[in-house]
Every structure is written in structure tokens, then in C-alpha cells.
Image: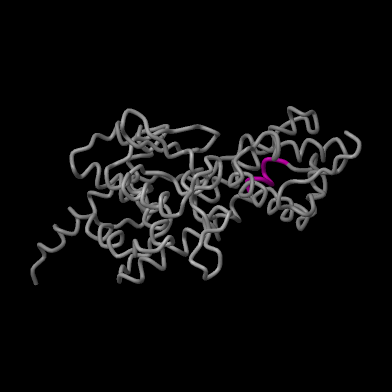
Amino acid sequence: MTQGIQLAIPETRTLPTLFTPTPAAAKKFVEFFTANIRNPHTRKAYTWAVTEFATWCEQHGLLSLQAIEPVHVATYIETLQRRLAAPSVKQHLAAIRMLFDWLVVGQVIPNNPASSVRGPKYSMKKGKTPVLTAEEARLLLDAIDSKTIEGLRDRALIGLMVYTFARIGAAITMTVEDVFIQGRRTWVRLHEKGGKLHTMPCHHNLEEYLHAYIKTAQLTEGKTPLFRTMRGRTGLLSDQPMTQPDAYRMIRRRAESVGIRTKIGNHSFRATGITEYLRNGGKLEVAQQMANHESARTTGLYDRRTDQVSLDEVERIVI
């Protein structure tokens, strides 16, 4: 083990003893999360999953990696299904299986006890993300006070997610220089999952929102955060980027102020934008490209046009 380097996983105080019986095993365990998993959200979810599994094993007398067999992993997955939804259970199993694979390759254990364990069946044709109608989205944007820096910031952030289908993670990590001119048109550069860069031309409304915000806030330093927190009640921006919880609180506050009762969140505007694009004649394969999805099936989960069709049909029941 390298001398002078403290083994640790970001946001984790202690390592589970089940996976760290020796210094070599501890090193491989930490490498799995730090060198193998780069996305901080995946790392956090997988850390929680394997820690929960380690705790369960210790409670049931499984105190060594060599003692764990497929039947134990399968039993654990069965217990998870009693309290977690199928997608969460599948994520837990994926984390456990990938960690054991890593330990096998690292010669910590001879085989993977989770490789033969199957997760619960789960199929989803339509996403569960709450969406807004075009009228509600327009109402929300128009109600934001554009005479304040905070209002300009919020309108630009919401507009970005609606008109580019941007994930909130990609939006809040943007810097000032990620808004740029190309061919007499404003473009945005989004830092997506896996370190991928995704560029999109701006809708004319978004172009107006972004330039109004950047000009009024006097954001001139290219590598500084674009969407920043407010400095207390001063009405001025801080130097710190907004976080996902910051954006969620803002969105909930803005929605409630105009009487929108749908419990929308950060992801709702991505789904709203995709749905309205398709409703107005857009093509699914183009929406997939705009949303930077690997599969058109994933994009299809955001298509909520059938919600309105179903509602119209229900109203035919005249009693």
C-alpha cells in the first residue's frame, strides 16, 4: 500500500469491515469507488448499497467474504423487495455484483457470489416524472420577476431545462463560457454524464433569458459558475454554484407562487420540453439526440402525450 495516503471514499467516514479484512482488500475496495466509478451520484448510491449489504451480512453471521454464497445474496435481495421499489433493488444488486467482480479481478476473492443472482423483473413504458402542460410552463416563466437578478437567474435556469432538455446536473455545472456565439446564434455547452460534452443551439426565448441574466449580473469571467447562489438577502450573486437541492427549492417555490399544484421537481422540465417537442411534430430520434440519450426507448419514457389522450377519453364517461 502506498505510504502516506489515507484510504477513503468521498463522503464516507468508515469502511465496512466485511470488505476490508486486509490492507490489500481495503485498497481494492476504495479503488472500486474512486478509480472505477467517476460519477459522484452513482458513487454515493453504490456506497450506500454495499454498506447496507455489509451490515446485513454481519447481522447474519457472515463475517468474511469467502463465507458469502449466491444463496445469501439472493436472500438479501428478497428482503430488499419488501421495502424498496424494483428499480432500487436492481440498483443495489448491480452495485453488489460490480463490486464483487472488481474484487475477483483484483484477486481478493476467487469468484463472484452475486453473478448468478437475478433481480426483480421491472418494465416501464412511461416515466413517473411529473410534467407541466405548455400553458403551465408558460405561466411559470412569465410570472418570474425579471427585474431582479434572482428572477433572471431562475428564469434562465428553468428555460435552459425546458428548451434544451438539460439534466439539472448538467445545468448547474455550466460556466459562463458555456454560453457562446456560433454562426450568429447562441449555443450552450452541457457537461453531461460520463464527462461527455453536449452542445445545443438556443431557442430564441432561451437566448433572451440567458443574455438578460448574464448582462444584468455582469458575469464576465468565463470559467466561473453560471448559475450561482444568492448572497443572503443582498440581491447579489455569490461565487458559489447552485446545487440540486437549491434548484429544487427554487422550483417548488416558483410553482407554488403561481398556484401549480403538480409536485414538480428538477427533472420535470426535461420531461415537459420533450413532451411538447413531440406534441408539436418533433421526431423521437431527434429528441433522443437533443436529450443526449443512448437509447430512443429512454427518451420515450419522457413522452407524456398519451396523458392528455387518456384524460379526453375519460371525460367521455357522461354520468
Q: Could you tell me which residue is drawn at 30 percent across and 70 percent down?
A: 258
Dividing the picture into quadrants, the one containing residue 98 is top right
The magenta stretch spans residue 72? yes
Q: Does residue 128 appear in the picture of this structure?
A: no
- Residues in magenta, as a range: 69-74
- Front position in the image: 27 or 4: 4
The residue lying furthest to the right in this view is: 3
| Image location (x, y in percent) of residue 295 | 39, 33
- Judge left or right: residue 248 versus residue 306: right
The number of discs equals 0
- Front position in the image: 84 or 159: 159
Looking at the image, is 272 positioned above or below residue 34?
A: below
Q: Label the magenta part by its dominant secondary structure.
A: helix
| Image location (x, y in percent) of residue 198 | 44, 33
Q: Quadrant of the N terminus?
A: top right
| Image location (x, y in percent) of residue 264 | 38, 61
- Judge left or right: residue 125 versus residue 18: left
- Judge left or right: residue 217 versus residue 27: left
Dividing the picture into quadrants, the one containing residue 105 is top right
Looking at the image, is 182 positioned above or below residue 163?
A: above
Q: Quadrant of the C terminus?
A: bottom left
| Image location (x, y in percent) of residue 253 | 41, 68
Q: Could you tell me which residue is drawn at 31 percent across and 31 percent down?
A: 184
Q: Could you tell me which residue is drawn at 32 percent across and 28 percent down?
A: 183
Dividing the picture into quadrants, the one containing residue 260 is bottom left
